[in-house]
């Protein structure tokens, strides 16, 4: 029996496994092939929905896809790969619990994505949060909502000001969308807090470049910046974070203030797992691949060369540097779901072609632009040269992602969330108490005082 292992069940890994399991169904059923998917989570996270989940527009459970239900013909191994010894066709996996185990394979698809790239900024590691996982989106929602209760309940003006000051660092997709959605949330719930004046709420967007949302082009990025500014968001371009020790934020433009909430989206880096492999890694830590999505060395940027192929290893998505052979100005495909899902289709077809001895085909996709949601009924879009703003762009954003999220049931649940949200008031419950887990029971059992909710900054 041949074993094909997919490392990571995100946008690349999930779609590769789904497509390949269909193509290889008869081989899998006859026991000739095993398709194994390894991921530390038992679900795929549809990342473009993280900002909507953080704002409470969709239930977090609806923004993820359970692997065992969706990938019926695959073997699911819940754990993280910790080492890759490709020369021996062997992986080391840390399962959820217990000792590590080894997995042997014939072919491996590397799709562990990217992780937040924290810079050595004093205080960043202790105070900031990224937005790459559903856990972070849930935490952020609880935390931001809890800031209102902190501010409304305290008599300390400094604590109050700190609680109501929010900072997002990074003005790409993740930063601008998260800020847009969360600011919209805070603006819509403040009426429930007569103790708080809406003018006390401060949102900052700090971006090193001279523009935000490069994904939608300069014109629409500038429009998005103007709209966010009109909403009272303080956008600092050409600026970055100097330090944020204990929540005391110092910007490179000299501004200083205190904040309990620092959302860090200023860049991502390829999953550091790749460094624990014997596969070729580029200067920025990406897996080197050719346009057939085979791991290969000696492939020049923006070319269709096959290079020196490492047999049996494939890669795509945020963790790989896939040459962009269109006339796009960048030499490698940008890290985006748009490329990831299309690369997944090509990759699955090529793995299947290699399996049956057919010719491999190159990946070629010209970036079509993008859509971004910036809060309820607000958005910006630039796709196929068609530019849209406001409600139309927002509808395009929702329509596009609804069409892309896997599974009819998942689409139905998300649509139901949106319809209920349209006819009802914004849900403002925060359940930060889930972080307490067994603490309340332990305290009672030990005869101590009942444990009350704790601030998320503890
Ligand atoms: C908030 C946000 C909004 C975004 N919005 C958009 C958008 O609107 N449009 C767009 O095109 N793109 C968007 N993106 C970018 C897009 O989501 C990514 O480019 C895409 O998810 C990359 O796919 P991937 O498969 O390479 O990685 P991922 O989707 O990140 O998947 C990686 C998988 O690998 C798993 N993994 C990690 N480490 C290990 C390990 N050691 N062993 C096994 N598995 C591992 C992870 O758990 C994960 O499931 C957004 C990203 C974010 C964070």
Image (tube, helix red, strand yellow):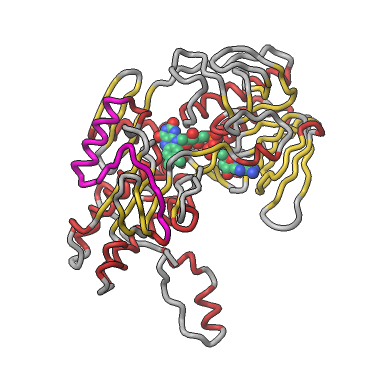
Name the quadrant of the N terminus: top right
Q: In this image, 369 relative to 332: left or right? A: left
Magenta segment includes 172:
no
State the image coordinates of residue 43 (x, y, percent, origin top left).
Answer: 56, 45
Q: Which residues are magenta?
A: 218-245
Quarter occupied by residue 404: top left
State the image coordinates of residue 423 (x, y, percent, origin top left).
Answer: 24, 49
Question: Residue drawn 24% across and 46% down?
Answer: 233
State the image coordinates of residue 175 (x, y, percent, origin top left).
Answer: 38, 42
Query: Residue extending furthest bottom?
Result: 447
Quarter occupied by residue 152: bottom left
Question: Residue drawn 62% across and 48% down?
Answer: 40
Q: In this image, 207 relative to 67: left or right? A: left
The answer to whether one can see residue 67 in this image is: no
State the image coordinates of residue 77 (x, y, percent, origin top left).
Answer: 68, 45
Question: Residue drawn 61% across and 24% down?
Answer: 347
Name the quadrant of the C terminus: bottom left
Magenta segment includes 243:
yes
Q: In this image, 344 relative to 334: left or right? A: right
The front one of 196 and 188 is 196
């Amino acid at each position: 029996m041949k074993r094909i292992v997919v490392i990571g069940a995100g946008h690349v890994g999930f779609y590769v496994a789904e497509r390949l399991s269909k193509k290889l169904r008869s081989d899998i059923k006859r026991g000739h092939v095993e398709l194994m998917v390894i991921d530390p989570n038992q679900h795929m996270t549809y990342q473009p929905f993280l900002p909507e989940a953080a704002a409470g527009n969709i239930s977090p459970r609806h923004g993820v896809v359970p692997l065992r239900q969706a990938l019926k013909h695959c073997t699911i191994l819940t754990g993280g790969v910790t080492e890759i010894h490709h020369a021996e066709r062997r992986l080391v996996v840390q399962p959820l619990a217990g000792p590590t185990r080894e997995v042997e394979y014939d072919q491996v698809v590397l799709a562990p994505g990217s992780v937040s790239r924290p810079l050595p900024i004093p205080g960043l590691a202790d105070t900031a949060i990224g937005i790459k996982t559903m856990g972070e989106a849930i935490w952020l929602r609880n935390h931001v909502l809890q800031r209102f209760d902190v501010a409304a309940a305290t008599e300390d003006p400094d604590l109050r000001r700190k609680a109501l000051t929010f900072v997002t660092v990074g003005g790409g997709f993740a930063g601008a969308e998260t800020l847009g959605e969360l600011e919209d949330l805070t603006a819509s719930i403040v009426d429930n807090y007569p103790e708080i004046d809406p003018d006390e709420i401060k949102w900052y967007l700090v971006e090193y470049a001279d523009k935000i949302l490069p994904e939608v082009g300069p014109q629409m990025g500038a429009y998005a910046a103007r709209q966010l500014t009109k909403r009272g968001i303080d956008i600092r371009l050409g600026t970055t974070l100097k330090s944020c020790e204990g929540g005391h934020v110092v910007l490179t433009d000299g501004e200083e203030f205190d904040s309990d909430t620092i959302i860090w989206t200023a860049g991502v880096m390829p999953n550091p797992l790749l460094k624990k492999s014997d596969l070729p890694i580029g200067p920025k830590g990406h897996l080197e691949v050719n346009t057939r999505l085979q791991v290969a060395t000696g492939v020049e940027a923006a070319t269709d060369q096959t290079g020196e192929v490492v047999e049996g290893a494939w890669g795509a998505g945020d963790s790989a540097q896939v040459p962009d052979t269109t006339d796009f100005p960048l030499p490698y495909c940008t890290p985006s779901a748009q490329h990831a899902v299309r690369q997944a289709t090509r990759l699955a077809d090529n793995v299947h072609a290699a399996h049956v001895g057919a010719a491999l085909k190159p990946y070629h996709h010209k970036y079509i632009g993008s859509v971004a949601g910036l809060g309820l009924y607000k958005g910006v879009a630039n796709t196929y040269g068609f530019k849209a703003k406001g409600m139309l762009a927002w509808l395009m954003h929702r329509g596009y992602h609804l069409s892309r999220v896997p599974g009819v049931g998942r689409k139905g649940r998300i649509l139901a969330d949106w319809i209920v949200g349209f006819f009802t008031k914004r849900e403002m419950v925060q359940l930060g108490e889930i972080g307490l887990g067994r603490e309340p029971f332990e305290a009672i059992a030990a005869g101590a005082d009942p444990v009350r909710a704790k601030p998320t900054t503890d």
